[in-house]
Amino acid sequence: MFNSIKKTTTKYTGLLIRMDDISENMNWRLMDKCELLFDQHKIKPLLGVIPDNQDPELLKYPKNSKFWERVSDWNKKGWEITMHGCNHVYTEKSDKSDIFNYGGNSEFFGLEYKIQLQKIKIGIKKFENNKIKIRSFFAPNHIYDINTLKALKDSDVKIIIDGYGLFPYFKHELLFIPQLFYKEMILPFGIQSTQLHINYWDDKYFKNFENFIKKNEMKIINLDYILDITNPNYLQKITNYFVEKTLKTARFFK
């Protein structure tokens, strides 16, 4: 019985490496170091690529003229290329009435369905022009509304790398893979994704991340692994329910 519990716990414990703000303009020196690190440890991260980056803050970083060649190379390695918004420019603001009660600036929240759909289609087309098929998405600043979810579903993008819970879950006919923490960490039990912004790192932070990878590489998983094991049972649904209620309430009153 103990071995059975241990086997189940191991199966449903893992961390998906999610990297945010991957674009032509970014900290390419540290990105190159991360790529070497991932290759050394046979890790297949999930890269949140901004298909049409127009974010003024990100445009200050060095530009890689061969960006889409790099993205294509990562895709060929089996790394998951995920759509991270469209242009990463915040034009709207949520009053914590967004899907996750985050509140704050948004690229999507509050826009009409047709406008959100158009933005998502523009992003998908950019990937298609570079022969990359997108199946997952996460919005800048974690902010979505019902129109965002509908536009994604209608664009055949049905995996969102965001949400509350200890396990992936289905809602609005979409699969959500939870992202809870701003710092990389592995819980004793559950499936999570990270939120890594390497543009804000320095060499010391990278060294800490490298040590984290070396220590936990056996618990780092990829998106396909998550999809293979995802079939939420009653216990997982109940656990997710209480985690979601607790965190959404905490965020609402923050």
Image: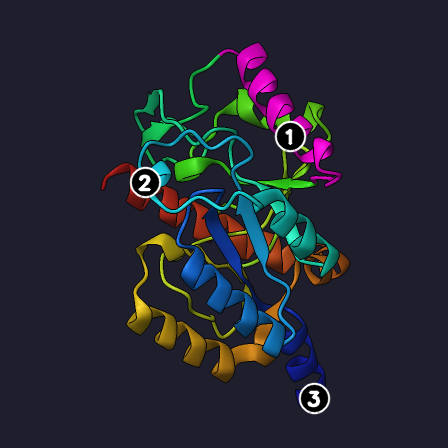
- Residue type at mark 2: give it: Lys
Q: Is residue 100 visible?
A: no
Residue farthest toward the front in the current orientation of the protein:
65
* Residue at (44% x, 55% y) in the render: 28
Q: Is residue 40 magenta?
A: no
Report the Cα–Cα distance between label 3 and label 1. Answer: 48 Å
x and y percent of residue 214 in the render?
A: 50, 82
x and y percent of residue 137 in the render?
A: 59, 39
Q: Earlier in the sequence, mark 3 or mark 1?
A: 3
Quadrant (top left, top right, bottom left, bottom right) of the N terminus = bottom right
Which label sits in the foreground, 3 or 1? Answer: 1
Q: Which mark is residue 126?
A: 1
Left/right of residue 95 with respect to residue 107 in the rendered view: left
Q: Is residue 217 visible?
A: yes
x and y percent of residue 72 in the render?
A: 68, 49
Q: Is residue 78 above or below residue 174?
A: below
Could you tell me if the residues under marks 3 and 1 are in contact, i.e. CB atoms within 8 Å? Answer: no
Q: Is residue 201 above or below residue 86?
A: below
Q: Is residue 126 magenta?
A: yes
**Which class describes the residues within 10 Å of circle 3: few (<14), some (14-19), or many (20+)?**
few
What residue did someone put label 3 on?
3
Q: Earlier in the sequence, mark 2 or mark 1?
A: 2
What sort of colour scheme is used for the picture? Answer: rainbow
Residue farthest toward the bottom in the current orientation of the protein:
2
What residue did someone put label 2 on?
60
Magenta part of the chain: 112-134
Q: Nearer the viewer, residue 8 or 182?
A: 182
* Residue at (56% x, 78% y) in the render: 217
Tell me the SS state at disc 1: helix
> Residue 173 is drawn in which quadrant?
top right
Report the Cα–Cα distance between label 2 and label 1. Answer: 22 Å
